Image (tube, rainbow, N blue to C red):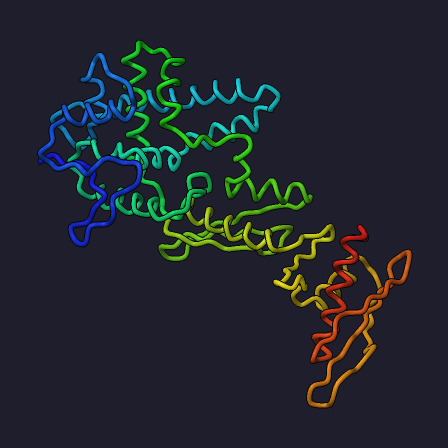
């Protein structure tokens, strides 16, 4: 019996996916599938047989499958996007153009197209194992926020979904007598949101590399496996920043990059490689230790602390501390806020000192 991809489970059924048609039953024939896909594309095929082929998985041995069309579609999508970015960004070098094209034709990007427009629902197949993979990815896409289409999600996209999109695009290409310019008019809306020069930095790995490059930092990613788990660790200038895990190598890398970006976004990596985080009060965590590391790296004398003021009764006493450091050019002095413990008061003074060093371009 021939089946079609279905994103629901027998019990309980999930809510319908957005931007997609109602789920198909097995009674609907290929003619209705062709008509539905034509409506999604807003294109009527002169040769509907070529679309039928594009909607047939290789597990259906009684009919020609989409494999040949998928081969053509892979090249068509790549060339269409190469033309688009070349014309859209005349002053951008080939390296960035390559990143833009790759971001738009990745397996995950095209798989999301199949889910968003419900194209996978119209593919006939005899491989029930594919249903679970498609369903898992479809439900993950449904539950994500709108930026996930650009960032990428945590569930690996089944390649079959990208193959479907490439095959359908190839069918249009063949049907319109290999007119690439016309094909682009048909498929551009289908492929939205398109990753542009403005949104390219939102790709997690790209954003991480570019962010650290601007700061003159070296990013290294190390992969290994532990039993059945893929692990990716990200180092910035030799220091471990984040680790991601998954049963898939690419997803482990994605998870690690996302974690690294989250940490860097709330951290400062200064010019001497000291990484520190600030809390909601803009106080640097473990500031005294961070200032000590800073002095060592800059080859400055050790910072000195002293209690400047004690206020309050014994059981509710507060302390204000100061810190002094000596750079190659000048001695710097800074007082912190009143705190209930001497250690906290010293950390407050150290935090203010580091902030001042950054703002004054000493680092």
Could you tell me residue 130's position as x and y percent?
Answer: 23, 41
Residue reaching furthest to the bottom: 314
Horizontal arrangement in the rendering, residue 226 relative to residue 203 (left or right): left
Horizontal arrangement in the rendering, residue 152 relative to residue 143 (left or right): right
Q: Residue at x 66, y 59 (%)?
A: 276
Q: Residue at x 33, y 22 (%)?
A: 73
Judging depth in this view, the residue of 53 and 193 nearest the camera is 193
Q: Quadrant of the N terminus?
A: top left
Q: Residue at x 79, y 82 (%)?
A: 310
In the depicted structure, whether residue 307 falls above or below residue 353: below
Horizontal arrangement in the rendering, residue 149 relative to residue 361 (left or right): left
Q: Residue at x 34, y 41 (%)?
A: 157
Could you tell me residue 47's position as x and y percent?
Answer: 21, 13
Residue reaching furthest to the front: 312
In the depicted structure, whether residue 73 falls above or below residue 307: above
Judging depth in this view, the residue of 171 and 307 nearest the camera is 307
Could you tell me residue 183's position as x and y percent?
Answer: 36, 16
The number of numbered discs placed on residues in the rendered structure image is: 0
Judging depth in this view, the residue of 105 and 189 nearest the camera is 189
| Quadrant position of residue 39 | top left
In the depicted structure, whether residue 75 falls above or below residue 12: above
């Amino acid at each position: 019996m021939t089946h079609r991809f279905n994103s629901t489970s027998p019990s309980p059924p999930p809510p319908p996916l957005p931007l997609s048609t109602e789920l198909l039953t097995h009674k609907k024939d290929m003619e209705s599938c062709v008509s539905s896909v034509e409506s999604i594309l807003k294109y009527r095929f002169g040769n509907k047989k070529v679309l039928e082929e594009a909607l047939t998985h290789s597990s259906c041995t009684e009919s020609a499958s989409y494999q040949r069309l998928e081969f053509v579609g892979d090249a068509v999508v790549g060339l269409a996007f190469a033309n688009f970015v070349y014309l859209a960004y005349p002053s951008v070098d080939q390296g960035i153009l390559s990143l833009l094209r790759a971001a738009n034709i990745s397996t995950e990007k095209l798989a999301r197209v199949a889910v968003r427009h419900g194209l996978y629902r119209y593919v006939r197949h005899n491989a029930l194992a594919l249903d679970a993979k498609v369903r898992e990815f479809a439900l993950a896409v449904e539950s994500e926020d709108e930026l996930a289409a650009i960032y990428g999600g945590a569930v690996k996209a089944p390649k079959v979904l990208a193959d479907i999109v490439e095959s359908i695009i190839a069918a249009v290409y063949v049907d319109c007598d290999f007119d690439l310019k016309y094909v682009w008019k048909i498929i551009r809306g289908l492929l939205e949101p398109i990753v542009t020069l403005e949104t390219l930095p939102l790709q997690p790995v790209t954003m991480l590399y570019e962010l650290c490059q601007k700061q003159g930092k070296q990013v290294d990613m190390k992969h290994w496996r532990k039993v059945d788990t893929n692990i990716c660790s990200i180092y910035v200038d030799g220091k471990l920043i984040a680790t991601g895990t998954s049963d898939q190598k690419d997803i482990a890398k994605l998870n690690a990059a996302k974690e690294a970006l989250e940490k860097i976004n709330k951290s400062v990596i200064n010019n001497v490689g000291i990484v520190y985080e600030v809390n909601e009060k803009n106080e640097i965590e473990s500031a005294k230790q961070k200032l000590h590391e800073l002095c060592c790296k800059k080859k400055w004398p050790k910072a000195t602390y002293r209690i400047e003021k004690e206020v309050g009764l014994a059981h509710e006493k507060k302390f204000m501390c100061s810190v002094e450091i000596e750079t190659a050019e000048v001695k710097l002095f800074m007082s912190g806020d009143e705190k209930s413990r001497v250690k906290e008061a010293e950390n407050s003074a150290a935090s203010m000192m580091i902030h001042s060093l950054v703002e004054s371009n000493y680092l």
